[in-house]
Image (cartoon, rainbow, N blue to C red):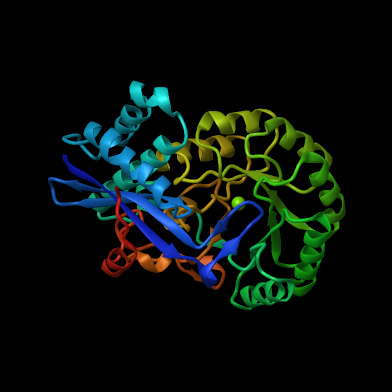
Amino acid sequence: MKIKSVTPFILHVPVTGGQIADSTHTVSNWGVVGAQIQTESGITGYGFTGTHAHLPSDQLITRCIETCHAPLLIGEDASDINRLWHKLARNPALQWVGRAGITTLAHAAIDVALWDIKAKAAAQPLWKLLGGQVRDKVRAYNTDIGWLSIPDAQLVAGAQRAVADGFTGIKIKVGSTVERDLRRLALVRQAIGPDVTLAIDGNGKWNLATCQRFCRAAEALDVYWFEEPLWYDDVKGHAQLARVTSIPVALGEQLYTTDAFAEFFAQQAIAWVQPDVTRMAGITEVLRVCDTAHSFRLPVAPHAGDMSQVHVHLAYAHPACEVLEYIPWIKDCFTEPADVVDGHFKLPQLPGAGTTPTASAWEKYRQVTA
Ligand SMILES: [Mg+2]
């Protein structure tokens, strides 16, 4: 399966309601920034990273794919995923300028595309290639009802609608003021009752003192996890918070490497592990984090920069993955959408990694890559 070409692409897909916000980001479109890899045997693979659809920075990623990574791949065997991962990640010139960031996001797209090719060549959905199903169902939790920009009444109505649709888990954003967020959390808990898991996500906005004050009051509301309470890289702060609150700390969506996760594991600063194949260098690196998490008996809830198109395969195959995020923005752009029925993700059936775009998405959302 010799690699014949590597072509970058960018899709910008509108989010629910035209715009959403959390404590840190305001997003109108989700960026699907990726690589299309063609082999001489006729199999085409797709992989992508997820962005805020900021075209200038998206184009840095596509330029990295095209001019830095692609020349190392042409003529190689696409099924040599482990060797090619190291060839790209340990390319001395590129490693010198970026062991994280643009270079890794570009690598993520390529690694996922290679897994897509391998699964298509085997005529199997990726979860089968990853060792097969470890669970009958993957429980979904709904994030799309819980943005910080949604007014209180609409937030409560959305949470109730999600539960009526079959979701047994939801997540709402925090990180505005302690008083406002506690009020919203209490309203939602009251509306959904005690049997639905309710997680919160601060997107790294607050400091330790604010998190401690918030957690003292929030503990009574049965919070499933507190995601990114503090600045993403603050290992010490997360460890301190974890020691003083009974609310489990979740994080990982902003971490690029296994080394970054290792610090959080070592300091017991993490209870829910949230790697993302679109942030780390693809499935290859995320599998390492999942295995390590499993060795500490910590559950994994992948962050869904891919809107779960790829992670649904991982969640069916890996014993550490207990629950998976549902945000429906881009699912209809793919030949097999990551759909949820009765609160659980459908088991993918088509060969590949779930990353093949439809012709109409390609037509409708494509942006210039340079
Ligand atoms: Mg998050």
Q: Is residue 90 left or right of residue 197?
A: left
Rendered view: 339 above or below 307: below
Q: Residue at x 79, y 46 (%)?
A: 211
Rendered view: 288 above or below 51: above
x and y percent of residue 159 in the render? 67, 72
**Residue 139 vs residue 20, the one in the foreground:** 20
Marks counted in the figure total 0
The answer, for residue 80, to whether it is visible in the render is no
x and y percent of residue 353 in the render? 35, 53
Q: Residue at x 51, y 54 (%)?
A: 304
x and y percent of residue 15 in the render? 49, 66
Q: Residue at x 67, y 34 (%)?
A: 234
Q: Is residue 117 left or right of residue 170?
A: left
Q: Is residue 264 left or right of residue 254?
A: right
The answer, for residue 263, to whether it is visible in the render is yes
x and y percent of residue 365 in the render? 34, 64
Rendered view: 19 above or below 290: below
**Residue 129 vs residue 300, the one in the foreground:** 300
Rendered view: 318 above or below 137: above
Quadrant of the rendering where the N terminus is positioned:
top left
Give residue 165's quadrant in the image. bottom right
Q: Residue at x 74, y 34 (%)?
A: 237
